[in-house]
Structure formats: C-alpha cells, structure tokens
Image (cartoon, grey):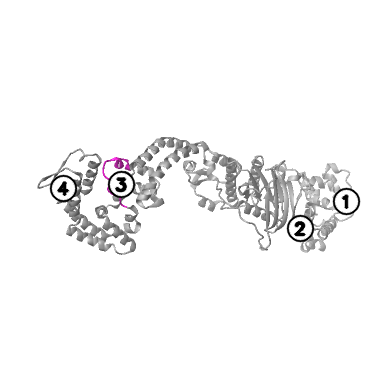
Amino acid sequence: MNKLKIEFENCYGIKQLKYDFDFSVKSTYAIYAANGTMKTSFANTFMDFSNSRPSADSIFTVRETKRIITDENGDELQAEEIFVIEPYNQSFKSQKLSTLLVNKKLKEKYDEIHLKINEKKDALTKELILKSGLKKSVDTEFSTDFTTYPNEFFKAIGRVKTEVQDEKEAEFSDIIYLKVFSPKVIAFLETKDFKTKLQDYIEKYNDLIDSSAYFQKGIFNHNNASTIAKNLKDNGFFKAKHSLILNADTDKKQIKTEEELTIIIQTEKDTILNNPELLKAFDDIDKALTKNAELKTFRNYLLENQKILPELPNLNGFKQKVWVSYLKEHKQLFLDLDTEYNKGKEEIEKIVSQAKSEETDWRTVIGIFNKRFSVPFKLKVKNQEDVILKRNGPAINFEFIDKDDKCEIDETQLYKVLSNGEKRALYILNIIFEVQARLKDQQKTIFIVDDIADSFDYKNKYAIIEYLQDISNNSMFNQIVLSHNYDFFRTISSRLDMSREQKLNSIKTEDKIILEKEFYQNSPFEYWKNHLDKQEMLIDSIPFIRNLAEYTGDEPNFLKLTSLLHIKPDTQSIKVSHLETVYKDILKDKATLVLNNPNKLVIDLIFETADSILIGTDETIELENKITLAIGIRPAIPELRQPTLVS
C-alpha cells in the first residue's frame, strides 16, 4: 500500500478532514495535535473502522457522518489492515497471541494426523449419538464414565477394547442412555428409600435365578443364554444337525433346533419375571416412580425394560455396560478408530516432545521486551505444547523478581503490585505480541499510534521509540504516530528520520481540521537564531540561550536571562541592547549581531508581542507564537508582577 486517503466528516468532533498520506517514500507519519484538536477523534474513527462499526458525532448525533478510508487505487481498506494502538488499555489482549507459539510445520503435521483420527472418531460418535440420545455431549459422557475426566475419550477407548472384542452379546444395545441416566433419574435412584426397594427386588430376583432349572446366579443367567443362542445361530450349529443337552436338576433335555432353545429360554425368563413376589417388589418400585414427569417417563421405560433393574444398584458399572453394548454393535467403526489412533499415537508423542522444546516467535517477543523495557517481572507460558498443537489459549504466568528472590504469580496478582508505569509497560508487551503476530501472518497493516509513550519515564519512553523505529523498517507496516506532546513529536520525527512531508501539524479552524507540513526541518532554534530580527523568534530564543549559558558555566548571563523568564529585581531594567550583548557572548557565530530597538525594555517587548499575537491570531497559530505566549503568560499575571511594581 503506497497511499492512505482519508475523508472524514462529523466524526467525534472532526467536522471535516481530508488528507492523502503518501507512504511510498517513508513508512511513518508523525502528527502533532494540541489538546482538543483532533488526536483522540482521529484514533477513534480508525478504531471504529478496524472493528467494522459506524462512526458518529458524539454530541450532534443527527449530523451525517462520512468516513472514507481508501488506498491509492480508491479501494476501501479491509478492517484487519488497520490497527489502533491506544495510549493505554489494561484490558487489551492480542487475539493473535497463540500464533506466536506455533511452529507451522509441527502444527501442520499434527493436524494431518488428527484429521484422520477425527474422521474415524466422527463416524463412531455419530452412531453413539443415535444410540444414546445424547447428541453433541456423547464423547464427554463416554470419557467421564470410564475415566472420570471429560477430555479423555481416547484413553476410554483403550480401556474398553478387550470387552468390545469378546464374544459376549451386546445385551444392552437397545437401552437409550439418556432415558436411564438423566440427572433427575440418577438423583432419585441414589435415594435411600429407592435403594431399599431396589434391594428387595434384587434379592427376590436372585432367589428365583437360584431356583431356576437352567440358570445360576453369577454363572449363567438368561442374558448368557441369549448370547449362546445367538452364537449358535450365527455359526450354523443347528443347520449342521447338531444338538445340545440342557442339564436340569431333575432331567436332561435335548435341544435340536434354534426354535426349541429360544422357547425354553423365553419361558424360563417369563417364569422368573412374572413371579408374584417379584411382581410385588416391582410394584413397590413402580409406585415410587410417580413423583414428577421425568420419573414417570423413566417408569414407563422401565416397564418395557425390566431387565435393567438388577443393574441399577451399580449405576457406574451399568453405564459402562451400556457403552460397551453400543460399541459391540458398531465393532468395525470402533476398531477402525482404535487402529488409526494407535498408528498416529507414536508420531504425535514425538511431535509433542519436540513442541515442548520449541523456541518459537514467543521468545522473540520476550527478548524484545526484556531487552528494552524496565519492569520487575518475566513472562512464562505454562501450556506451550497445548497452545502449539491444540486449540487451547495460552496460560500466561509471571515471574516476579525482587533482588535474588523469584515468585511465580498470575496476572491479577501482578497488577496489584505494579506501579502505573509498569502496568503501562505490560500493556506495551501485549501490543508487541499483536505486532509480531501480524508480522508472522504477513498481514499488511497501518498502525494508528495514539500517544503511546504518554506518562512513561524517559527510559521506557525511548524504548517505545526504538520499537516504533523497528516497525517503520518493516515493509509490511506503515504507521501514523499522533501526539499532543511537542517534545515527543520532535523526538520521534528525528529518530525515525522523517522529512518535512512526514511531519504534520494539525490546525483546527471553525469548519475543519487542516494537516500542514512542519515548517522547520530540523531544530527550530537553528532557524530562530538566524532570524533574530523577528520579535517572536528573538523572544523564543531566550530560554535556549539561557540553557547554553548554564551548560557553559556563564552564571552572570544565565541569571540575566532568567530575569526575563521570571520576575526578578532587575527584570524591569534589562534592555534589548543588554540582550544583544548576551547573545554575542554566547553565540560565537553572532559577533556582528545588531538588534532593533536597543533601548526598549525586553519585558515590554515580550508583553507587546504577546498582545499582538492574541489580537491578530486565528486558529492557525505558529510554534514561535505559542512559545512567545508561553513566555509572556507568567510575568503577565498581575499578582506575579506586583513585587516588581512595588520595588
């Protein structure tokens, strides 16, 4: 992007602003904007754009707003091409943070393995959803039932493999998990009253099994018999003219057909389940299940599936039996998933091991921050491999340092002990994350930098300037740096080697904001000392010359010039001719200097010049006029002038 063209109307107090920023020569512009001119409004308008929301006038909300932000071809920029760096925002956290922790090749390899595994997993869980009625929570329920943890699906798969592969019947494959194991039903099943009634039923059921001609408790029940009947049928036992002998207490019965076996098993089952004492015990249970609609639903389901009653005393065990039954019905899908997972598991472990030792772009950010900024803490990421390989957000911890002592604390604790300046430095750290992430993504960006160094100490202020210089040297980035601090404006312009075209002053008129090129290419003092015939520039040079006198140890001249900046006993006696002599003494290249009106009192010259500026000025007041007014303000206050008048 070579140009940024903006046209704003009625945007947060900006009535009108139109300007073309040309980045083809230099990537950075600096704008000096005095308080109340346009700085915050300018930044807010770009912030709206970057967040894809409309701008408006804060006061006159009915005024029509115009916000045009285009490139050199007239094409509107994309929202992600603008990023506004606020002066301070404690809550700001870069959304791109995790990208700095990712080794791209490792991530791609990891994702490729998991894509294949997840395809097999999705095929299986789709069937489990249909069987269980659990919908999207099926994998977490399955994991929890076998491991007590919701995110250990594959560990749970490994635990049930032997059971799924055995030859036992999928006896509970027709049971709908959600109908039995809903929270309200489970809470009721765990009550003491219900457990007592259930225990009575179980005891009578076991007695009937023990007295059965063919079944034995804990060894061979009707479910085992059904499994055998199915296996015999599936393997063509009766079609091959084989028969089997059922060994009862009183006699032995030969079975020659599948139908005979099925009838005997069903008859024995019915005899047990229709026993009067067992039915009475079931009736007691049935009556307890009428307290609310959900329990009534479970009651109706239980009437149709009385075989689950003996399983209810051990709910966790029953849950696992139900899952295993489902998996038996879809054994091939289960085995496909298990094979794919084990095939990729070893490679995943190698990737995770490598990920833990990765020196990613995160380290670059830490290096930049620790090298340049003065703060009492260092950063650590506790779950780097999870951020790299999974989709987890980084868990950032801070190591607070006090001399030789170190203590790991979280961000909330850290904010309680940091000074305001250190908190602002932490904000800068998050900005660096954002910038580095955009660099890694090769995201072309225009940064709108709104007084980012305001209120910092000098060390950290210059660290920020160095970082802005780094940004300016990257071809992916352009930036517009705004400040109401003229000293910072001059410093950033100088350190980033800007020409007049990139140094702008904002001027607020009644109808619009004007951005004008900086008048002075280098130090204004260089220009002023060569134009001392101009009253404003002569006056503006006084504090500069006074500083030179102080640095060179010229105390008499330092004191004389101080009397022109503060009311002193000799303030009312210093003439322009005295000022001429001082300038000749200090400025060696001004030995032939001749000033106008040599007999005029300098203090009068200051007041007269300041008054003329006030009377004749408009909104486009120049720098030299502002400094003249600043010099004239203090001695112009009557209370401050009174001692001189009295003396």
Name the kind of residue labelled 2 in the image. Thr
Residue type at mark 4 is Tyr
Mark closest to the chain's N terminus, 2 or 1:
2
Quarter-of-image position of residue 511: bottom right
Q: From the viewer's perspective, tell me whether residue 278 is left or right of residue 541.
A: left
Residue contact between numbered discs 3 and 1, judged by CB atoms under 8 Å: no
Going from N to C along the chain, the mark reached first, 2 or 3, is: 3
Spatial CA span between label 1 and label 4? 131 Å
Q: Regarding mark 3 in the picture, which secondary structure is present there? A: helix
* Label 2 secondary element: loop
Residue 324 x %, y %: 31, 46
Residue at numbered disc 2? 509
Distance, label 2 to label 3, CA atoms, is: 81 Å
The residue type indicated by label 3 comes to: Ser
Number of the front mark, 2 or 4: 4
Segment tinted magenta in the rendering: 160-175
**Residue tagged 3:** 325
Residue 162 is covered by the magenta coloring: yes
| Quadrant for the N terminus in the image | top right
